[in-house]
């Protein structure tokens, strides 16, 4: 639950293996649930999905509060502005549904809620896609692992290959964008930062009133 929260809410968690972790957790779902207060598997999945929802809320809040600073921040090992632009491309293409689509894209799912906060997505709209996306992501991967593990008992003998395949499939679109995607212009970066500053200024004025 902590890893899912960090990957979906903290930009330093973009490297965490959410997809493969959920799939493997589904394979060992019954043992996982019984070891955690002996709860039903569906309750365990619900708790994990809730952590994904809370993670995105943190990312959204961080984007609303710190948008302009992120575009001025220099790249570090843990923070790359290109990840922000990658998430913004998904947002521009899918609109509000980007929060849902991003759940299934490594790296992008970490930065998508931050972008939603920067561009000022309506809170109700954000929460709708946030909740639907988190539950769809967690339940689909964990149930896939659970039922495949039941159907193919020898699946656990090849976990390394399964994890590698999942990582390759889920990161392929992201890697393609990183290699062949267009680099954002300085003007676009500046405009987005200015828009975020204006929204923050309007919020401060409303609070004073």
Image: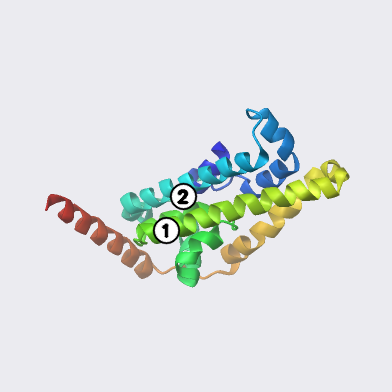
Residue 25 percent across, percent down from the top left: 69, 41
Q: At 64% across and 30% down in the image, what residue appears?
A: 36
Label 1: which secondary element: helix
Q: At 70% across and 47% down in the image, what residue appears?
A: 23
Please determine whether, in this image, residue 77 is positioned above or below residue 72: above
The reply to whether residue 114 is visible in this rendering is: yes
Residue 170 percent across, percent down from the top left: 66, 58
Q: Give yes or no for contact between labels 1 and 2 (Cβ–Cβ under 8 Å).
A: yes
Q: Residues within 10 Å of mark 2 (few under 14, many from 20)?
A: many
Q: Residues within 10 Å of mark 1 (few under 14, many from 20)?
A: many
Residue 17 percent across, percent down from the top left: 63, 46
Q: Which residue is mark 2?
A: 56
Distance between the alpha carbons at the discs numbered 1 and 2: 9 Å
Q: At 66% across and 61% down in the image, what residue appears?
A: 172
Q: Nearer the viewer, residue 130 or 183?
A: 130
Q: Nearer the viewer, residue 73 or 173?
A: 173
Please determine whether, in this image, residue 160 is positioned above or below residue 182: above
Q: At 34% across and 54% down in the image, what residue appears?
A: 67
Q: Which residue is mark 1?
A: 126
Q: Which numbered dot is residue 86?
A: none
């Amino acid at each position: 639950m902590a890893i899912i929260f960090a990957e979906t809410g903290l930009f330093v968690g973009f490297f965490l293996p959410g997809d493969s972790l959920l799939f493997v957790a589904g394979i060992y779902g019954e043992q996982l649930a019984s070891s955690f207060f002996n709860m039903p598997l569906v309750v365990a999945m619900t708790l994990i999905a809730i952590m994904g929802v809370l993670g995105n809320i943190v990312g959204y809040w961080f984007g609303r509060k710190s948008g302009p600073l992120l575009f001025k921040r220099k790249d570090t090992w843990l923070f790359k502005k290109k990840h922000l632009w990658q998430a913004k491309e998904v947002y521009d293409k899918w609109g509000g549904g980007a929060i849902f689509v991003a759940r299934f894209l490594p790296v992008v799912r970490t930065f998508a809620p931050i972008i939603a906060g920067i561009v000022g997505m309506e809170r109700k709209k954000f929460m709708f896609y946030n909740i639907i996306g988190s539950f769809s992501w967690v339940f689909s991967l964990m149930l896939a692992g659970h039922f495949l593990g039941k159907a193919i008992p020898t699946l656990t003998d090849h976990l390394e290959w399964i994890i590698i395949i999942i990582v390759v499939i889920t990161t392929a679109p992201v890697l393609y964008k990183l290699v062949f995607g267009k680099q954002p212009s300085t003007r676009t970066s500046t405009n987005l930062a200015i828009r975020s500053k204006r929204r923050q200024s309007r919020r401060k004025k409303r609070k004073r009133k």
